[in-house]
Each structure stands twice: as C-alpha cells, then as structure tokens.
Image: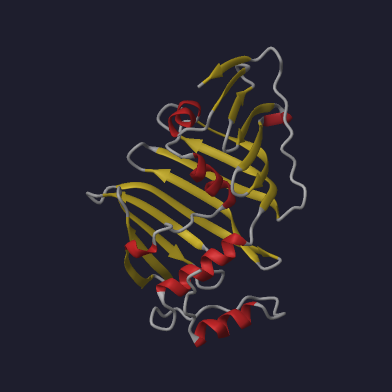
Amino acid sequence: MKRMAVSFGTLVLLALFSSCSPRRAEVLLDTKALSASELIGLVTDGERKLSTVVGRGTVSFESPELAGSAAFDIALKKPDSLLVTLEGPFGIDVGTLFLSREKYVMYNSMDNRVFTGVPTTGAIRSALPFDLTYEQILDAFSGSFPFPSDQTELESYAVDEGLFRLSFRTDAGVATYWVDNEHLVVTKYERRDKEGRLLMEATLAAVIEQDGISVPRRIKVRFPEQGRQLSVSYSSITLNHPHPSFTFSIPPNAHTVIR
C-alpha cells in the first residue's frame, strides 16, 4: 500500500488533536505550512470517524412547484443506510424516506402512496423534487461532502476569506470545497459546469464536536438554475450511536408505485 509522506508540521497538528484539551487547536491557515494532500488527509480522516447519526430537527424545501417544512427524526449509518421520518403540525405523520444501496422507499401519508424501487438517480428524482443522487442525499443529512477520489485532478489550493479552498477539475466541470481550519470540516461546496454556471451550492454551519468528531448542525443545499433549495437543521444529534434503528412500517392499503 502506498504511504503518504507526512511533514513534521502535520505530526505536530495530529499530536495537538489527540491531546486532552477540550478545544481543538486551529490549523495554521497557510497553504505552504500545510499541503493540499495533507489537508485532504486530515479532513478525510475526520469524516471516516463518523459511522452513525441519530437526531431530530427540521427540514424545509423550496421549489417552483411547492414549498414546505416538517420536523424529522433520522437514523443514518454510513455509507449506505438512511431513514427519515417526517412529522407535520400537531404530531401528524407526513411521510417516510428510507434509502439503502439496494432499495428506496418514499411514503407520502397525505395521499397514502409509496414509491419504491432500486435507488437509481432517475428513480430518486421521480420521487423527490431535487436533483440529488443517492450518495448526495446521505451526504446532505450527514453534513459531509467528500473530496473526489482522484486527487490528481486538483486545480487550485488557496486561502479564501479565512478558509482553505480546494478546486478539482471533474468530467462535468469544477467542484470546489472550502474547509474550516478549526474543525477541519467542509463548510461550503460548489459544483459548476464547464461553462462556469453554478449548478449546486451547499453551505454548512453551526459545527459541533462530540468525542473528537465534528459535524455541522445546519446544512443548506441550493440549485440556483432550478430554483430549488433543501435545508436541514438539527435541534438534537448523537454521533456514532451504537444502535440506530431502521424499523418503519407502511400501511397495507397504501398505493404502491414501483420505479
């Protein structure tokens, strides 16, 4: 296995992170002191520490066709399981979203209809009013937007308004990430096409830390050209819960649509 060379400065940073101090030491905001590959490694290592999420909060959405918000309970297990139970005013059940690699279930209690099938991009888009892939939905609720696996496509690495900024050239255009130097998490993400048009923007805020793992409690994903927006705000969250439950039920008389 290929080993990445780690500078003395990075070893010092890692030693600081593993200390008993209640507050994480900030990384020096200097691209010369910390290379892009070292930063990518530190952020990725932090993301790998997160295995499960159990929480409660509010999700809201806006689109040209409809808009609304609902309370939710969530169980998430990386990298492939998500259960979101939606609740409207006065505790009325609104719906259920379940995602795994093999299956998706989207139940709407308002019309007692359930969409289900293999979670291809087309199937998900037919059930949800957002241009999100299966992986991006999990990323949005876990508050993480991983770097591209092919790091040879790094186009630029700089400091921008108090954050590290890394841009990667992709087949579809450019993906850009902004990294907070205190918690070492992505706090902004953009995807642009080859003509520079902004296709997707994610902003992440209110970062909390539990047992050495940092995650944002507020996540907003926008699709400017489509006029669509999804916002997730956690009121309570538990990281690496040992036993997240993915149990749910659908009324037997629900009308089923398989896609």
On screen, residue 234 above or below 168? above
Q: Quadrant of residue 122?
A: top left
- Residue at the far front: name it: 1
**Residue at the (46%, 40%) spot, across then down:** 133
List x then y, in percent, for residue 54.
70, 48
For the residue pair 137 and 78, the one nearer the viewer reads as 78
Q: How many marks?
A: 0
* Left or right position of 74 against 181: right
**Residue at the (38%, 54%) spot, across then down:** 190
**Residue at the (53%, 47%) spot, across then down:** 140
* Left or right position of 236 against 164: right
* Left or right position of 155 against 33: left
On screen, residue 106 above or below 31? above
Q: Is residue 31 visible?
A: yes
**Residue at the (60%, 28%) spot, across then down:** 105
List x then y, in percent, for residue 130.
45, 35
Q: Quadrant of residue 174?
A: bottom left
On screen, residue 55 above or below 216? above
- Residue at the far left: name it: 195
List x then y, in percent, for residue 72.
66, 39
For the residue pair 242 and 232, the one nearer the viewer reads as 242
Q: Is residue 162 visible?
A: no
List x then y, in percent, for residue 213.
64, 64
